[in-house]
Amino acid sequence: MAAVKIASVLSQSPPVSSMSRSISIRDHSEDIGVNSNDSLLGVDDAIPIIDCSMFSSNDPDQRSQAVQILGNACLEYGFFVVINHGIPDSLINGTMDMLIRFFDQEEEEKIKYETNDSSDRIRWGRGDVNRVSREFIKMASHPQFHCPTELHGFREVLHEFSKRLREVGIVLLRGISKSVGLDEAYIEQAMDLESGYDFLAANDYPPRTSATNAIGQFPHIDPGLLILLMQNASGGLQLLHKGNWLNANINPNWIIDSVADHLEVLTNGKYRSTIHRVIVNNEVRRVTLPLFLGPSLDTMVRPSPEFIDDNNRPAYQGMTYRDYLESNHRHVIIEGKSCLKQIRL
């Protein structure tokens, strides 16, 4: 088996808009340190590729190498691509087809899930049509699975997909634990992942033929430990790395993974939550399905003692995952907004 390596991302589908004009994004990203007036084009550069099958290899050297590369990816990039993850193409394609069927329904079928009730675990909505081009459906997926049931087969397919994607996430978190010198079960146990609160956030980015609303999502970071994203078509996601927006133009059947807020808190800033944004693809409709893999709602997340010493004081205040998710402006757990800025010390 070939060694895991840093490789150039492969473009598998039409590119994002070729607009060369700049836009101001300061109002949406000044709290996460993104410069204003940058181009929408992004750059094509190397993104780490992790061969997930190596974590279960019979060769201890390959397992060790996979852990080392994973740790380097988290440290130097904060994101990476996972191949050989074991999720069948048929399930991936079937999930994307189901999402398209859901989004193609009449609005009256979807608007029943437009809610800000804090007890709800399903929420449908649209981005501000004057600023972004995006429709979404968010669903809590673990420890209980919540999903619309009106569309035949929708719940069953998404439930199976979410279970398989979560299994990959657990493998990666075990590798991340080992990458920082801890027992592979450390994160799993410390964050009570058996009762971990996960949610799916499916997005529908329609194709655009002009510069209007070229943004699908403004620059942001996300709550949780890891974000695992799959998509029906490449071209749109951009990840910030050393001042450049890297285009994540990869095979749609690979997984794009990124470090999220609570892995940053747990490691006291060693691994940093990834700033990313979405530029609408002007040629194809793009549907994405990220899984937000998180601690249990009642887990107190604070910097682990292993990352604290006389030279590295705690950089974040402790907070339960529930309180963190409810700190967004709507106080809706399913909303899934970051509030990392508020808990930095």
Image (cartoon, rainbow, N blue to C red):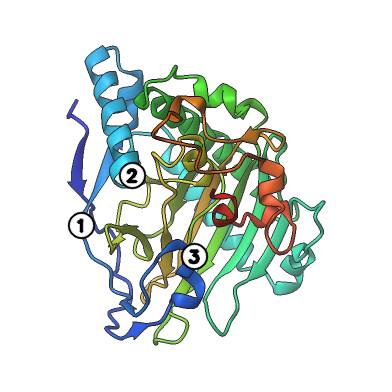
Query: Label for residue 188?
Result: none
Q: Earlier in the sequence, mark 1 or mark 3?
A: 3
Category of crowding for the residue at label 3, using alpha-carbon neighbours closer than 10 angstroms: few (below 14), some (14–19), many (at least 20): few
Position above or below: 154 against 220: above
Q: What type is the residue that disc 1 sits on?
A: Asp
The quadrant of the picture occupied by the N terminus is top left
- Across and down, in percent, residue 132 comes to 52, 77
- Judge depth for marks 1 and 3 and give the one in front: 3
Residue at image x 71%, y 49%?
A: 147
Horizontal side of 323 relative to 236 (left or right) equals right
Q: How far apart in space, not on screen, are marks 1 and 3 (Cα)?
A: 26 Å
**Residue receiving disc 1:** 45
Horizontal side of 301 relative to 79 (left or right) equals right
**Residue receiving disc 3:** 31
Horizontal side of 245 relative to 113 (left or right) equals left
Q: What type is the residue that disc 3 sits on?
A: Asp
